[in-house]
Amino acid sequence: MPHSVESRTSWVVAWTALAAMSVSYGAPQVAVVALKPIAASLGNARELPALAYSLAWLGTAVGGLAMGRIADRIGVRWTVAFGAVMVGIGLLVASGGSAWQLILGHGLFIGLLGNAGLNAPLYIYVSRWFDRRRGTALALISSGQYVAGVIWPSIFEQAIAAYGWQHTMMVFGVAEALLVAPVALLVLRNPPAAAPLSAGAAASRPGQPVLGLPPNLALALLAAASFCCCVPMAMPQGHLVAFCSDLGIAPAQGAAMLSVLLGCAFVSRQFWGWLSDRIGGLRTVLAGSAFQFTAMTGFLLTQNEFGLFTVSALFGLGFSGLIPAYVLAVRELFPASEASWRVPSLLLFSGSGMAAGGWLAGWIFDHTGFYAAAFATGLLFNVVNLLVIVPLVLRARRLRGMVIAGVRAAE
């Protein structure tokens, strides 16, 4: 049996990464919970706080391109510590009370300089500590967003009601920097020297075809698919509390509903990680995307509190495995030496999809006065995602069949 790089330290590193992301990803959640109060203080346009939330995601995705390479040179502990401090500064800036401060704080500090230092670098870093259970480990650390969604919305809702959204941002910003940066510097060490590709990897040398396609074309298709699946993924996450409030459901219940959605996402993401280690990243993407489409339709079919709690739980169960499955697919299909730029490139498009979905839902609401049109638009993006992924899965299946047939013929 080949030597494995996995050890007890691998899991210490993975759980530390999860903890760091669980705190840092709480930062954009303040704008989600306080969407209506922020809009009320800035002219009543929901597009503005929705844009701030979206820019935090977009900045995270764009900044990851540079941060992935920087982490390769100076070490991931430094990008994580730097990012944590920037997230704290971003919340302090965003709490200033003006539109430009809200946008600058989220787009530049929380996104481009902040969570960008955690997101892509930690995906690449943790993947190098694992070879046998890489999908499980990636699913675990990528659950940081959902752990944040379980813990923080209800806390933020109470804090905002008692002290206002600006003070809530300020206090959480200071706490986030003081918690995450020291832990990163103390725990995150250099990964093992060489973590081999999984046994099913389709490419071991740069330049080889991937799924029978030029490698950059294969990555472009995966990136386009990830963008399209993340547009609908972001809509309920960014607007559920406001959507519930419009229906006469108390904000506290809306925040609880968001916590249920993201809590179910955390639990099911571990299942999707287990599954991806057995069927591969690409087929897991297809299964998760089909589940997300089915659950998303529920937001168009029910408007009562019990029904929305149920739909939120199902939506969380469905979409949660997608992002780590995309990352796993890249690690399975492309050489490990290219991970430092291929993984951030993919995450650029998935993060851009999250940003586009969050902003688009707010823009559509401001022009139509209801969220059904936004959710229907999200479903159209999900259909495009399936139209891209299904041919790739079929191509992979055909190539795998050809390889098996060739082996049997040689025997």
Image (cartoon, rainbow, N blue to C red):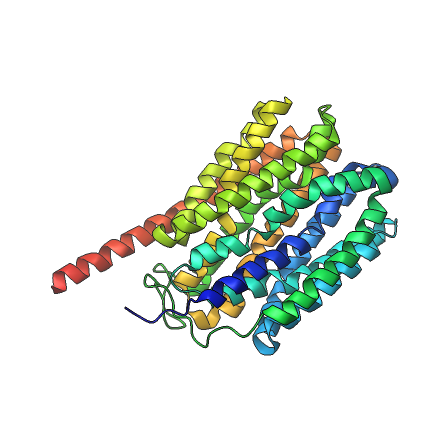
Residue 182 x/y as whole percent: 69, 67
| Residue 185 appears anywhere in the view | yes
**Point 70% across, 53% down: residue:** 56
Depicted 48 relative to depicted 206: above or below:
above
**Quadrant placement of the N terminus:** bottom left
Q: Nearer the viewer, residue 70 or 89?
A: 89
Residue 298: image quadrant is top right
Left/right placement of residue 101 relative to residue 301 reads right
**Point 38% across, 48% down: residue:** 391
Q: Nearer the viewer, residue 250 or 385?
A: 250
Residue 233 x/y as whole percent: 57, 42
**Quadrant placement of the C terminus:** bottom left
**Point 88% across, 49% down: residue:** 97
Left/right placement of residue 392 relative to residue 262 reads left
Left/right placement of residue 7 relative to residue 81 reads left
**Point 39% across, 45% down: residue:** 390
Depicted 411 relative to depicted 106: above or below:
below
Depicted 186 relative to depicted 25: above or below:
below
Depicted 14 relative to depicted 380: above or below:
below
Residue 223 x/y as whole percent: 51, 55
| Residue 108 appears anywhere in the view | no
Residue 52 x/y as whole percent: 75, 49
